[in-house]
Image: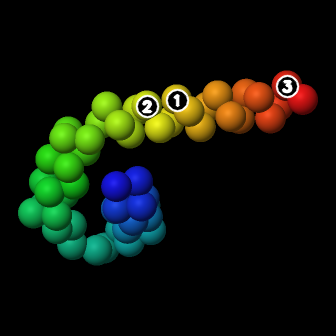
């Protein structure tokens, strides 16, 4: 899921004249809504690992 969101972000930031695919945006939003708890949990894990790495 993160890769899909990253792809969208890349297109949004780098293709100003690109026609946005609203259907795909809607699909990504629904997927995020269904999985956001997992996403947030994984991001929290990443933050903890980074904190551990910087405190060494």
Disc 1 versus disc 2: distance between alpha carbons? 5 Å
Mark 2 closeness class: few <14, some 14–19, many ≥20 residues within 10 Å:
few
Task: Identify the residue at the far left of this view.
Answer: 23
| In this picture, residue 11 sits left or right of residue 56 | left
Could you tell me which quadrant the C terminus lies in?
top right
Visible residue check, residue 12:
no
Q: Position of residue 5 (x, y in %)?
A: 36, 56
Residue that appears at 35% across and 61% down: 4
| In this picture, residue 47 sits left or right of residue 17 | right
Element assignment for label 3 = loop
Q: Quadrant of residue 54?
A: top right
Mark 1 closeness class: few <14, some 14–19, many ≥20 residues within 10 Å:
few
Could you tell me which quadrant the N terminus lies in?
bottom left
**Label of residue 4 in the image:** none
Element assignment for label 2 = helix
Contact, mark 2 vs mark 3 (Cβ under 8 Å): no
Mark 3 closeness class: few <14, some 14–19, many ≥20 residues within 10 Å:
few
**Label of residue 44 in the image:** 1
Residue that appears at 21% across and 67% down: 20
Residue 55 drawn above or below residue 49? above
Contact, mark 1 vs mark 2 (Cβ under 8 Å): yes
Residue that appears at 39% across and 65% down: 7
**Label of residue 41 in the image:** 2
Visible residue check, residue 1:
yes
């Amino acid at each position: 899921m993160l890769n899909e969101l990253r792809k969208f972000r890349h297109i949004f930031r780098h293709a100003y004249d690109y026609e946005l695919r609203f259907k795909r945006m809607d699909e990504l939003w629904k997927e995020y809504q269904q999985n956001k708890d997992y996403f947030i949990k994984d991001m929290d894990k990443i933050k903890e690992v980074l904190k551990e790495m910087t405190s060494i």
